[in-house]
Image (cartoon, rainbow, N blue to C red):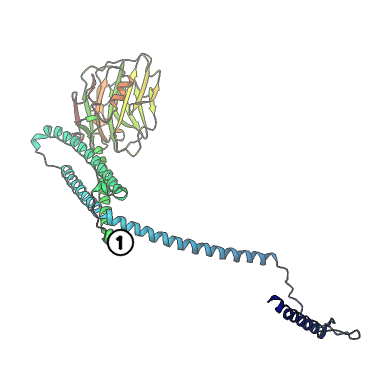
């Protein structure tokens, strides 16, 4: 079978070769270049005119500056817009958190704060009314003047204690209210026993404002009460006598007839002494007499004086003088001032003390001198020189006007510790009474308009 088909295959192969040879003869290859825009040698075409390119001019320094400013302004606007968007988003989230916090803690905590504030306000108001009632003047019977003096001093001391307690309570309640408000804004809900429904709606801002206004009102009322209590306490201290003393001498004005004579408990033939007193002058002149002792021969044996802003002590005459400046003010003072004068003839050392501190001292003041006995001792005036009737020769310009208390005199020079103890405004400073003149024991006779007050 293979031999039978072999001639057929050879014939087919020969036919294919013939066809291929015939096709290659018919194809003609043209290698010439066909350019349609070919230019001949004899032609010189003119160039086509073209538009000149844009030439950029040089920018000046101001143009560059304006360009930079425009660029920076654009960047700033973009940053501001971005910051504004971020702030709005953060504020919205913060508001949502605050409202959620108010739902959880605001109800019970706000009610507790409001009730506590109302209770504290009512308590302070009741105590304040009670205190003001105690401050009202009470009518006393004319026949019980001595008993009323002791009771009034005791009542004033008790009133001061009550005011101190009330002021301390106000401060304590203010501190507690502040702590309560802080714990309500920062404390956990578990510690307060709050139960919040998960489906409760967020309250509006109008629901929170009344509670805040009520708390602000309570705080403002407590602050006003505290200021009023401090004013009442300050005024009561000004009316109270210093060092627990119960009575004082009042010299209502300057007059030759207004003074107080003192009858000493011991003779005044002394070689040393200490004189102390509390004074509250209404006004101070160039020479204001507080304490004066003298006789007909020498009316200026001892003088404790005020002069404008200074204090003076003379012993044995006006030539022997010790001066301390800046002790009082010329227009008087609203506070009590404690003054002491001490002298010893051994070395003639004289000293002045104010508020328990030594403010002046001088040696050689009437050294070796001994005070004569048999003279007269006055408060608020000085003895008239060579006048038998006494009152007729007094000078109203040197008279003392104001209040005086705690006048004591010793026949020795007190120590520095004793001087400091006497000048204590609070406490038993007046207990150590003098052995020559003792306040509340020695006879003192007011003349003219001078009088004892509580």
- Give the mark count: 1
Residue 304 x/y as whole percent: 32, 27
Q: In the rendered view, would you say 38 is above or below 392?
A: below
Which is nearer the eye, 2 or 241? 2
Report x, y in % for residue 18. 79, 83
Residue placed at 73% from the left, 77% from the top?
6
Q: Which of 121 and 353 is in front in this view?
A: 121
- SS under mark 1: helix
Do we see residue 382 in this rendering? no
Q: Residues in magenta?
A: 194-198
Percent x, y of residue 220: 27, 51
When the figure is inspected, residue 6 is found, relative to residue 247, above or below; the finding is below
Quadrant location, the C terminus: top left
At 26% from the left and 22% from the top, the residue drawn is 409
- Residue ID for mark 1: 205
Residue 436: quarter of image: top left
Q: How packed is label 1: few (under 14 Cα within 10 Å), some, or many (20 or more)?
A: few
Q: Residue at x 84, y 81 (%)?
A: 31
Out of 2 and 165, give the one closest to the viewer: 2
| Helix, strand or loop for the magenta stretch, by majority | loop
Q: Quadrant of the N terminus?
A: bottom right
Residue at left offset 21%, top offset 30%? 245
Does the rendering let one see residue 312?
yes
67 versus 1 height, above or below: above
Q: Is residue 123 above or below residue 254?
A: below
Q: Is residue 32 magenta?
A: no
Q: Is residue 147 left or right of residue 305?
A: left
């Amino acid at each position: 079978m293979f031999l039978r088909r072999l001639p057929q295959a050879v014939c087919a192969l020969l036919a294919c070769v013939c066809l291929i040879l015939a096709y290659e003869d018919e194809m003609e290859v043209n290698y010439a270049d066909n350019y349609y825009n070919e230019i001949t040698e004899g032609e010189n075409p003119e160039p086509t005119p073209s538009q000149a390119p844009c030439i950029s001019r040089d920018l000046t320094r101001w143009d560059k500056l304006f360009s930079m400013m425009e660029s920076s302004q654009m960047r700033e606007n973009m940053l501001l817009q971005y910051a504004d968007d971020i702030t709005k988003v953060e504020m919205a989230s913060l508001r949502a958190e605050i409202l959620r916090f108010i739902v959880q803690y605001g109800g019970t905590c706000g009610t507790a704060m409001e009730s506590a504030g109302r209770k504290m306000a009512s308590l302070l108001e009741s105590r304040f009314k009670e205190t003001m009632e105690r401050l009202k003047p009470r009518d006393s019977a004319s026949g019980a003047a001595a008993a009323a003096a002791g009771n009034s001093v005791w009542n004033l001391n008790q009133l001061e204690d009550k005011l101190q307690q009330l002021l301390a309570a106000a401060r304590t309640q203010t501190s507690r209210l502040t702590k309560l408000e802080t714990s309500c804004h920062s404390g956990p809900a578990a510690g307060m026993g709050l139960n919040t429904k998960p489906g409760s709606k967020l309250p509006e801002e109008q629901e929170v404002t009344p509670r805040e206004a009520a708390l602000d009102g309570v705080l403002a009322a407590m602050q006003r009460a505290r200021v009023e209590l401090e004013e009442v306490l300050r005024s009561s201290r000004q009316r109270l006598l210093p060092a627990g003393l119960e009575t004082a001498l009042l010299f209502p004005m300057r007059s030759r007839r207004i003074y107080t004579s003192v009858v000493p408990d011991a003779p005044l033939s002394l070689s040393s002494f200490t004189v102390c007193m509390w004074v509250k002058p209404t006004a101070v002149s160039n020479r204001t007499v507080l304490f004066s002792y003298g006789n007909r021969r020498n009316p200026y044996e001892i003088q404790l004086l005020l002069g404008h802003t200074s204090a003076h002590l003379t012993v044995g005459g006006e030539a022997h003088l010790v001066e301390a400046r800046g002790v009082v003010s010329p227009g008087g003072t609203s506070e009590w001032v404690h003054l002491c004068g001490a002298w010893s003839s051994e070395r003639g050392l004289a000293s002045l003390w104010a508020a328990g501190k030594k403010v002046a001292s001088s040696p050689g003041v009437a050294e070796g001198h001994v005070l004569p006995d048999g003279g007269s001792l006055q408060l608020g005036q000085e003895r008239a020189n060579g006048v038998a009737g006494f009152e007729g020769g007094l000078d109203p310009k040197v008279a003392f006007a104001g209040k005086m208390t705690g006048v004591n005199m010793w026949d020795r020079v007190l120590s520095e510790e004793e001087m400091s103890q006497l000048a204590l405004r609070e406490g038993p400073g007046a207990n150590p009474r003098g052995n020559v003149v003792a306040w509340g024991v020695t006879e003192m006779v007011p003349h003219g308009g001078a009088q004892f007050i509580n």
